[in-house]
Image: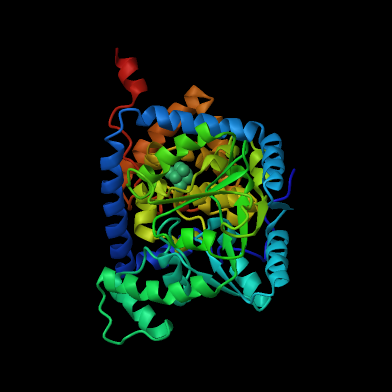
């Protein structure tokens, strides 16, 4: 089996199991208000613009089919991408895991002599813990996406794929800026426009004085070697065009075969993610162009457990993900716990299926249970990832306690024998009639009913009803 993402580097493993972290998050009423308000707003906006498209379901099916095709011939497409990027003047690096990717990027930045990089928001670089690796090498990473900047200045962790500071409200953001951003007027209000203006002033100088940028990539087109980054603030465009050197770290599953394929995703992504009809800033570049934009371009192709995911015929559909975050915004569990409880940079339903696969299920064993299996994520996903199916598939791989296996074997034995089954039904009814002591099961089965009501046995079973006739 291909290797999973190594421990001790990056942000794919939490420090505690989901139920423990979730319980603490649930006690934070401010967090629940902030996340509830934000997800409700995005959901409504996204639902409205998706409703405008008569062919939305066809687009979803096309997106899903293209991703399945990509995964079926990933090596071939990646080699085509490498050839095209190289032909266009870029340099391609292959990173088997987070350690190798961090080393490649750090060496590339050091070779330029720069001690600072500007960053476009990127899940891949968060996944591998690039900021920490750069800082260890004496290089300052500056996040330029507004929400990422809030997280970085607040010495915090992102809690949403698309809106990393979704757990913060305006008053908290004002307080972070006053505390951590140099030269901010103490009279700053918590009006969004005022907060954005302060951040813009702070970042503008950094854009103009930094020689190296690090980005992720939403897509890479194999037929031409073109990379694409979609964003809403224009900070990405600054990072991708102003510096002398651009380094892009991209998960290997982000490649698409042709521009026609890219067209499908550029329709799906903005409506499903931010609820916009068209993405505000879509930047695309192919290698280097003399006299225009960065004159050195490096593409780091990151595996970090993806080949292991690809090897699982059911699990591999998690690699279809285009990181739109629609599944987070509809998830009743995410809405109540927020993102930190998942312990990984990938929170919500997609995190519950992707993180355990990247790290190996044993290292994130509680995440496949962080769901009510209501199916809202499947309905919302623009590339039709069957997340509930994946959750159940992964629950099968989690090491189960011996008591549970014994109970299941006993249930199977009973259900295989009609007489025994009837007797068990009668016993269950009698025990309920004899005295209702709470609604739970006795130990060792009480874990099952800790958060579920045990249904009352019916007054008449189907067998009794059938026998009467
Ligand atoms: S799993 Fe689907 S809905 Fe969730 S982030 Fe990925 S593409 Fe979006």
- At x 45%, y 29%, the residue is 61
Residue 212: quadrant of the picture: bottom right
Decide: is 429 above or below 161.
above
Tally of numbered discs? 0
Instruction: Name the residue rendered at 68%, 64% in the picture.
Output: 105
> Residue at the front extreme?
291
Is residue 346 in view? yes
Q: Give the image quarter of residue 129.
A: bottom right
Judge by depth and name the residue closer to the eye, 190 or 415: 190
Indicate left or right for 322 with 460 as reference. Answer: right
Q: Position of residue 176 (x, y in %)?
A: 38, 79
Q: In the figure, is residue 322 to the left or right of 90?
A: left
Position in image of residue 354 (x %, y %): 55, 48
| Quadrant including the N terminus | top right
Q: Nearer the viewer, residue 355 or 108?
A: 108
Above or below residue 101? Residue 307 is above
Work out which quarter of the rendered image holds the C terminus and state it. Answer: top left
Q: Nearer the viewer, residue 272 or 435?
A: 272
Q: Is residue 93 above or below residue 374?
A: below
**Residue at (25, 41) in percent of width and height:** 48
* Color encoding of the figure: rainbow
In the image, 166 versus 420, the foreground residue is 166
One can see residue 13 in this view: no
Quadrant location, ligand no. 1: top left
Q: Residue furthest top?
A: 469
Q: Is residue 38 left or right of residue 311?
A: left
Image position, residue 89 (x, y; %): 69, 50
Relative image position of residue 172 (x, y in whole percent): 33, 75
Q: Is residue 250 left or right of residue 195?
A: right
Compared with 211, 81 (above or below) is above
């Amino acid at each position: 089996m291909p290797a999973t993402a190594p421990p001790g580097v990056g942000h794919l493993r939490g420090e505690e199991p989901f139920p423990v972290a979730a319980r603490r998050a649930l006690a934070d009423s401010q967090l629940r208000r902030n996340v509830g308000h934000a997800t409700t707003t995005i959901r409504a906006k996204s639902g409205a613009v998706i409703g405008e498209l008569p062919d939305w379901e066809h687009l979803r099916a096309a997106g899903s089919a293209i991703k399945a095709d990509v995964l079926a011939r990933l090596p071939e497409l990646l080699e085509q991408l490498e050839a095209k990027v190289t032909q266009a003047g870029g340099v391609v690096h292959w990173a088997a895991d987070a350690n190798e990717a961090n080393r490649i990027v750090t060496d590339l930045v050091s070779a330029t002599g720069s001690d600072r990089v500007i960053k476009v928001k990127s899940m891949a670089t968060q996944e591998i813990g690039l900021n920490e690796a750069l800082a260890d090498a004496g290089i300052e990473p500056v996040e330029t996406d507004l929400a990422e900047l809030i997280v970085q200045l607040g010495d915090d962790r992102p809690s949403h794929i698309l809106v990393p500071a979704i757990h913060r409200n305006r008053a908290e953001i004002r307080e972070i800026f006053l505390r951590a951003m140099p030269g901010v007027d103490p009279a700053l209000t918590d009006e969004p426009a005022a907060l954005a203006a302060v951040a813009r002033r702070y970042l503008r100088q950094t854009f103009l004085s930094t020689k190296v940028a690090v980005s992720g990539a939403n897509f890479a087109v194999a037929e031409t070697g073109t990379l694409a980054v979609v964003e809403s603030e224009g900070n990405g465009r600054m990072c991708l065009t102003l510096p002398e050197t651009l380094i892009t770290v991209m998960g290997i599953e982000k490649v698409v075969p042709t521009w026609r394929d890219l067209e499908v995703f550029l329709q799906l992504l903005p409506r499903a993610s931010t609820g916009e009809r068209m993405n505000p800033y879509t930047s695309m570049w192919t290698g280097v162009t003399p006299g225009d934009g960065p004159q050195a371009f490096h593409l780091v192709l990151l595996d970090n457990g993806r080949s292991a995911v690809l090897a699982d015929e059911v699990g591999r559909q998690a690699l279809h993900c285009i990181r739109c975050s629609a599944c987070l915004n509809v998830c009743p569990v995410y809405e109540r716990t927020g993102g930190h409880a998942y312990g990984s940079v990938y929170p919500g339903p997609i995190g519950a299926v992707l993180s355990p696969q990247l790290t190996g299920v044993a290292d994130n064993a509680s995440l496949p249970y962080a769901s009510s299996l209501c199916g809202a994520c499947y309905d919302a996903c623009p590339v039709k990832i069957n997340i509930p199916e994946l959750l159940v598939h992964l629950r099968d791989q989690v090491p189960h306690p011996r008591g549970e296996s014994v109970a299941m074997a006993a249930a199977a034995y009973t259900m295989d024998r009609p007489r025994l089954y009837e007797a068990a039904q009668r016993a269950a009814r009698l025990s309920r009639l004899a005295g209702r002591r709470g609604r739970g099961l006795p130990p060792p089965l009480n874990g099952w009913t800790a958060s579920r009501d045990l249904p009352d046995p019916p007054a008449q079973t189907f067998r009794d009803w059938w026998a009467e006739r």
